[in-house]
Amino acid sequence: MRNRVEVMHGVNLDQLGRRDPAHYGSLTLEELELQISGMARELGLEVRFLQTNHEGKFVEHLHRLSGLTDGIVLNPGAWTHYSYAIRDALELTGLPAIEVHLSDVDAREAWRRNSVITDLCLKRVSGKGPDGYRDALERLKAEFAE
Ligand code: DQA
């Protein structure tokens, strides 16, 4: 039974708690990860986390995931909007993935509406804050049960 999920946070997500609370709320990344761990436990999923501000590290982590996890929840931060390197690496994993954004990216600046990974993902969740991660985990759980 597949139950392993890699939760990947990209650039500037380590600054949660200092970023505009109107968009991102007031949780720190550590607090957010704790909440996600609780959600995963309730769903019977096993989560591991990565956050980095280095695009190459994010890419290399994706390279290593095959066989180590069953699915990916990723919030690449601003890389979402332009990093074809991350897109290519995500595609290479061949793993089911869900794109998450804390803020409502479609209701902000025009450049945030573009995502170079959406079509590779089973689902895109945006503007639901931490609860968006529950939606993402539930969607992966449903996928694992297929
Ligand atoms: C974000 C939205 C991105 O546009 C932004 O660059 C981020 C965070 C979000 O979670 O809402 O860093 O991915």
Image: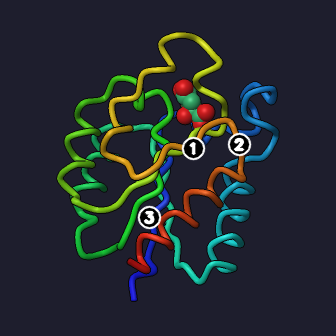
Label 2 C-beta lies within 8 Å of the nearest ligand 1 atom? no
Residue at disc 3, secondary structure: strand
- Residue drawn at (41%, 31%) of the image: 80
The quadrant where residue 16 appears? top right
Q: Residues within 10 Å of mark 1 (few under 14, many from 20)?
A: many
**Amino acid beneath label 3:** Glu
Can you give x and y, in whole percent of width and height, for residue 93 in the image? 22, 58
Q: Is residue 104 left or right of residue 92?
A: right
**Amino acid beneath label 2:** Lys
Observer-nearest of 107 and 62: 107
In the picture of the structure, the residue carrying the numbered disc 3 is 6
Can you give x and y, in whole percent of width and height, for residue 42 in the image? 69, 79
Q: Is residue 106 left or right of residue 128?
A: left
In the picture of the structure, the residue carrying the numbered disc 1 is 125
In the rendered structure, find residue 93 and report the number of the disc placed on it: none
In front: label 3 or label 1: 1
User: The C terminus is located in which quarter?
Assistant: bottom left
- Residue drawn at (22%, 46%) of the image: 89
In the picture of the structure, the residue carrying the numbered disc 2 is 128
The quadrant where residue 118 appears? top left
Q: Earlier in the sequence, mark 3 or mark 1?
A: 3
Residue at disc 2, secondary structure: loop
User: The N terminus is located in which quarter?
Assistant: bottom left
Can you give x and y, in whole percent of width and height, for residue 34 in the image? 71, 65
